[in-house]
């Protein structure tokens, strides 16, 4: 659609319908305060204490100390000009044992955060689950236990009851493909299980929990806008070998389709159905495929897949030599982002919000105390430009959230990878906006003033 100047807005909507510019974080990666005011252990607290699981023995015990410094972080977002902030609730902070008695101190923390965001003119987007399962529930089987759908529904009801008067945007899960495959199938993430049955149980029970949570939110929050956040990336064969092509198809089913397909189409991909069917009961697919309002996309790069002897017969290989890479080796292919957005638009027919996109860089303060992260700026230029191309081609993209607001705890990489547009000096917890933060703020400002396609404006920002 076009505005009254004959131009397409960034959201594919007429002028006056705002495109959402935001920033994203997650609870375990930034909050810290792991053992204060009644918070219970999560599976990541336990996993970090296992020798050799996380680089340098790092933990999320302190992280960015956002629990105590959230007002400073909200002020940073206000300076950036973002109009939305996606964060996650720490399930063990509000329900230390995952169920039963709530922790009032934990609930009040999110009250303070939400109120501060609203006072700053920033819309809170709440993700219910970003990987930090209460350890007490893990000891009861975690995502392998079908009862978890009820536990998750009860947790969702608590969140809806406390925050639904001020929060309307809810995501059920962040990247379920990652925490199930890495946590229950390959043993690379918490809780560190590598078991075929555990993986397929977890996939199905996460899907059941999604459906249950959607129903709770619909019943509890007037005007709720609900989605789920999926990491969706093309899976290419790492070599021309037939076994690698077959491995790429297998991994794509787990990575791209194991959750969106049952949640939207009430079916599992055919290649996964036989493995998951033993854990299904009559009516399950109807319980999972509840109507939602938008598709949340996390995207960084395509995957290059090779055959492997692990339980899914596939693993991640290196990209071709001619594909540029980030400092941590991830391919830089903006065209894959554009094509993914167009594919989502055609396949699912829902408004799309990009809820994670960004890159890790080798960021250091220079002699002047500045982080000149030109590589990140180039990456963001390329990817927001590709998003603009997708919008111009008809994709209904309505928002973009950079990953991440802050440098943070990056799971098994600990603090060795910096994804933030704001530098965190961990010993002092000082926040220092990087050059990319200034670039992002400038782009948001120009977009709002001009209401022209993203790709055009990125080029203008680069020239300016």
Image (cartoon, rainbow, N blue to C red):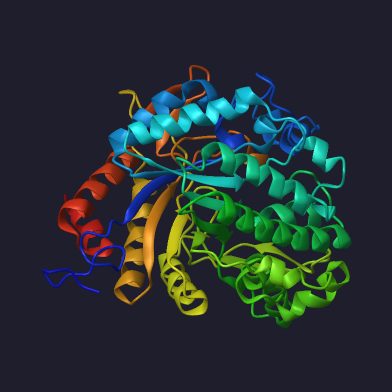
- Residue 143 as seen in the image, left or right of residue 287: right
State the residue in front, 60 or 333. Answer: 60
Answer yes or no: is residue 365 visible: no
Give the x, y percent position of residue 214. 61, 57
The answer to whether residue 346 is above or below residue 350 is below
Give residue 103's quadrant in the image: top right
The answer to whether residue 116 is above or below residue 361 is above
Identify the residue at horizontal 27%, vertical 42% (top origin).
441
Q: Which residue is outermost to the left?
A: 5
State the residue in front, 166 or 419. Answer: 166
Give the x, y percent position of residue 191. 79, 44
Total tally of numbered discs in the picture = 0
Give residue 18's quadrant in the image: bottom left
Give the x, y percent position of residue 406. 46, 35
Give the x, y percent position of residue 459. 22, 59
The answer to whether residue 3 is above or below residue 361 is below
State the residue in front, 125 or 464. Answer: 125
């Amino acid at each position: 659609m076009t505005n009254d100047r004959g131009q397409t807005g960034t959201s594919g909507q007429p002028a006056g319908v705002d495109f959402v510019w935001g920033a994203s974080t997650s609870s375990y990666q930034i909050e810290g305060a792991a053992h204060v005011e009644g918070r219970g252990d999560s599976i990541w607290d336990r996993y970090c204490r296992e020798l050799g699981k996380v680089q340098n023995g790092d933990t999320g015990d302190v992280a960015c100390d956002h629990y105590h410094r959230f007002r400073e972080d909200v002020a940073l977002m206000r300076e950036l000009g973002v109009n939305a902030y996606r964060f996650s609730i720490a399930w063990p902070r509000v329900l230390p044992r995952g169920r039963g008695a709530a922790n009032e101190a934990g609930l009040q923390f999110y009250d303070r955060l939400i109120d501060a965001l609203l006072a700053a003119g920033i819309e809170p987007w709440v993700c219910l689950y970003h990987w930090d399962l209460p350890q007490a529930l893990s000891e009861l089987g975690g995502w392998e236990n079908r009862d978890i759908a009820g536990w998750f529904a009860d947790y969702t009801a608590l969140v809806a009851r406390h925050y639904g008067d001020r929060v309307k945007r809810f995501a059920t899960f962040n990247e379920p493909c990652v925490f199930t495959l890495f946590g229950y199938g390959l043993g690379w993430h918490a809780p560190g299980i590598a078991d075929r049955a555990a993986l397929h149980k977890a996939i199905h029970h996460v899907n059941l929990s999604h459906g249950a949570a959607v129903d709770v939110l619909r019943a509890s929050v007037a005007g709720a806008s609900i989605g789920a956040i999926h990491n969706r990336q093309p899976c290419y064969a790492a070599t021309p070998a037939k076994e690698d092509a077959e491995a790429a198809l297998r991994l794509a089913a787990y990575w791209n389709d194991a959750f969106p397909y049952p949640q939207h189409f009430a079916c599992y991909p055919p290649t996964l159905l036989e493995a998951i069917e033993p854990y299904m009961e009559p009516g399950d697919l109807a319980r999972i495929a509840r109507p939602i309002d938008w598709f949340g996309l996390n995207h960084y790069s395509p995957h290059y897949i090779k055959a492997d002897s692990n339980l899914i017969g596939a693993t991640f290989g290196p990209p071709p030599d001619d594909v540029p890479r980030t400092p941590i080796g991830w391919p830089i292919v903006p065209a894959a982002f554009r094509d993914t957005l167009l594919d989502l638009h055609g396949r699912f027919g829902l408004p799309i919000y990009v809820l994670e996109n960004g890159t890790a860089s080798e960021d250091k303060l220079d002699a002047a105390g500045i982080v000149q992260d030109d590589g990140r700026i180039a990456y963001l230029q390329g990817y927001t430009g590709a998003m603009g191309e997708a919008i111009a081609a008809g994709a209904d993209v309505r928002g973009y959230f950079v990953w991440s607001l802050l440098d943070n705890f990056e799971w098994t990489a600990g603090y060795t990878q910096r994804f933030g547009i704001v530098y965190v000096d961990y010993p002092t917890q000082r926040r220092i906006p990087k050059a990319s933060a200034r670039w992002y703020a400038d782009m948001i400002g120009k977009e709002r003033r001009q209401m022209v396609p993203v790709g055009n404006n990125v080029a203008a920002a680069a020239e300016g």
